[in-house]
Structure formats: structure tokens, C-alpha cells
Image (spheres, rainbow, N blue to C red):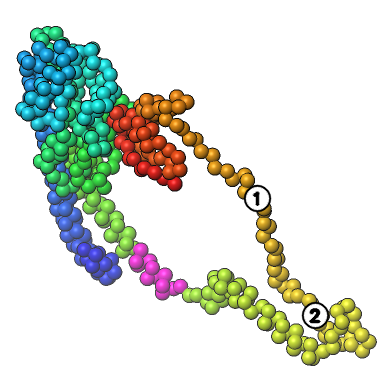
Amino acid sequence: MVKFLSDLTVQRKGLGDFMHRFCVLVVIFAVCTTSTSSSQLVDEDAAMRFSEHVAATVHEQRSKLDAAANHPDVVASIGTGNAQLLASLEKQLLEGTSAMSVKLLPLGFDDIDRTVDPPIGFAVLDMLKVSRETGERPAIEAHLVGSKDAHIVVVSRISRGDLLVGHARWALDLNIVVAAARSATFSFGYAELSQKLAEGEPLVLLWLGDELHRSGPPVYSKDVDGTLWGMSFWNNLETPVFVGESKPLPMIVAGAGGVFVLVLGGWLFIRSRKRESRTEVKTPMMSDSLDYGRATGEMRGTKDKSIDSVVDEEHDMVPVTEGDGHLAEGQMDSVVVDHFAEDQMFPEVVSATPVVEISRDIFRAYDIRGIVDQDNISTDLFYTLGQVLSNKTTSRNFLVARDGRCSSPTLAQALIDGLLDNQCNVIDVGLIP
């Protein structure tokens, strides 16, 4: 293609030959554009199928979990307060489902519980509150994304008739969504499955395709029913082509016009350059005057030698005064040269860099050192601090690092737990200098 354009612009051929090659180029461009548009439509169909597959997968899981949670034995035991009995029922429920863990919660449960795996934080309490106040199943969410405890949360309502008596908190492996992603492949596009947050940007759960195609608004987006998730798809088109709507002709016309302008502009540019090369004349004086920096450098580099040689020659030829500028009698017709102590044509100013002496006493290291369980500094305080930080900032990504000289790993972990329970992404850097 490059050689084709080069021949087209450089060789002097007739207008008929030029138009013939241009038509061939338009045909090639039209075929490529039509092929690309078809590929983009196929990718959008794949994005729709992926969204539907994710929705079908989570709905199937929810139906099975809701049925298991409302087993007669569970309904009869949920309000007894017998922890041993509930633990036995939880073990039986796991054997018949694909969940990682389950926790049976009485109706009045409203406290965080960090002893269970995965822990029950404020996000789960919010889901329980939605169930109690609205009478509906809370939307499925993903919790602790980015950590080793990442999981999908499904809250099942346990009812005796129309009376709500408790809840079951199920934790599912996030890989069930990853498995659904295997059903979609993209040759030209990029898709994201993200979770909506109360504040800030959505939390990306997984992505498919090449992120280079992610520009501008998505050409396709759809919420996954019954969840806080949404699917978005980009194909990096200036004018989006939606599913079922193919408009290749305007694109072909616009592209062909652009190619024609580029080819014609290149041809005219090369002709003008050839014309300039025949008429342009550069004299030695013009060439030397353009290289001002090089000439100045050469002049400065040879100034000492040239001036000294001139002075020496004239010193041998004519009498010289002692430096007062007055001629002796009989020397009025001679050339007089005064010797200077230094070369005055290019004076050089040399100054020493001042050194400021500063006492080291002003550089002092101040440490804020807290001791656990003293002065009201405790793990509960730092856990609450993590909750506050996650609610007051728009970013959902945090780095946590500890001072290597004097710090508490217990407080740092409490801060991390507070951030994670509010669905933040946390990277634990560890000790730093």
C-alpha cells in the first residue's frame, strides 16, 4: 500500500491513470470498512449475550439458595437462639449448594461480626436493612473486591408464611461470574462488568477485550437484573453503530473523501518541493550567517591566540609606551600600542558561590506514635476511621503503609478492615522507611 501511494504521488502520470488508481483505493477502503463494521456488530452481540449469561447465572443461584434457606428445619430454628443448632444447620445447607459459606441471622441481628469467614460488615447490615424496610430481596452485591476474601453476597429472606423471621447470608465464589465471561470473545471492542457504588466511580469486577477501545461513552450498556451490576461495551467508533443498525455507506463516502484529500495534498506538496529545489539558491554568506552559534564559538575559542599574536607583531615593529598613553618625542609618526593587564574584549566575571551554613538542629524528625489501648487509640477507632475515609472520599482505591520505625500492625489491619467493609480496594504496602 505504501509503495502504491509512493508511485501515485511521485511518478508523473496522466490524470486518467491517477483517477484509475484512486478508484482502486476507494474499493479497497470500502471492503475493509464493511468488514470492520460487521466485526463490530458481532462483538456487540457477544456483549449482549455475556450480560444475559451473567444475569441467568446469578438468578439460578439465587433461586436455589432461597429455597434452601426456607427449609422447614431452618424456619423452625432461626428464632430459637440456639447457636449450636444453627451451626449444624449451616453445615447441612452448604452440602447441598455451591456457596462458600452461609450464616443464619435472626431477625434482630444488627451487629458486625468479624469472627465469621467472610466477615459480616456494614455492607451486609445495609442489605439486611433494605430487606426489613422494603419487604423485598436486596440486590446481589460483590464485597471485598481486590482482596483474598472477595466474594458475591446473596441475602435470602426466611419467612414463616408472610412473616419475616430471619435472613441467610450466602457467600459465593466470584469465579462464577468469570466462568460466564468465557462465553464472550471480542475481536474489536472492550467490555466491563462493574458494580454501582453510592459515591464515586463504579467498581470494575472484570473486563474483556482490549482497553485501547475504551473511549467516549459506551455504545452498549445494560444493568444486570437483581444485582448492582451493569455491563458496558465500547468499540472505539466516532459514530457508534448499534445492534441491528448498519450504516456502512456514509462511512465509506467519508473515508473515501478523506483518502482523496490526503493523496491529492501529498501529490501537490511533492510537486511544490521539486519546484522549490530547482529555483532555490543559497550563497555562502547566507549559509554562514545562519550558523551564528558555531561562528561565535569559534571566535571565542581563538580570541586569546589571535589577539596575543597581533600584539606581539606590533610590539616588534614599533616603540611601545609604558602604559600612560603619551608618546615620547620623535615617536609621533609611529603606531602606539598599550599593553593591558588582561584581555578586555571578552571579560569574564568569576564569582564564588556563597555557602550558607545552617545548623543541623533545625532538622528534627517528629513522630506521631500511638500506643494501642492508651489515650483512646484502639482498633475500634481505626476501624471506624477506615469507614469514615471510605464514605468521605470519591476514590475507592487506597494504599496503606506503616512507619517502619514505630507503628502498630494491629491498628493498620483495623484501618484496612474498615476500608474493605465499605467495598474499597486496598493494597497493604507494609512497612516503609
The type of residue carrying mark 1 is: Ile
Give the labeled residue for mark 1.
358
- Horizontal placement of 216 versus 30: left or right? right
- Horizontal placement of 312 versus 243: left or right? right
Residue 86 horizontal/vertical position (percent): 14, 19
Q: CA distance from mark 1 to mark 2?
A: 46 Å
Residue 19 horizontal/vertical position (percent): 21, 61
The answer to whether any part of residue 351 appears in the image is: yes
**What residue is drawn where x is 90% and y is 80%?**
326
Depth check: give the residue in front, 180 or 95.
Answer: 95
Depth check: give the residue in front, 149 or 210.
Answer: 149
Give the labeled residue for mark 2.
339
Residue 58: name its quadrant: top left
Mark 2 burial class by Cα count in 10 Å: few <14, some 14-19, many 20+: few
Residue 67: name its quadrant: top left
Please provide the residue range marked out in magenta.
269-280
Mark 1 or mark 2, which has the lower sequence index?
2
Is residue 256 shown above or below 312? above
The type of residue carrying mark 2 is: His
Judged by depth in the image, the label closer to the viewer, 1 or 2, is: 1
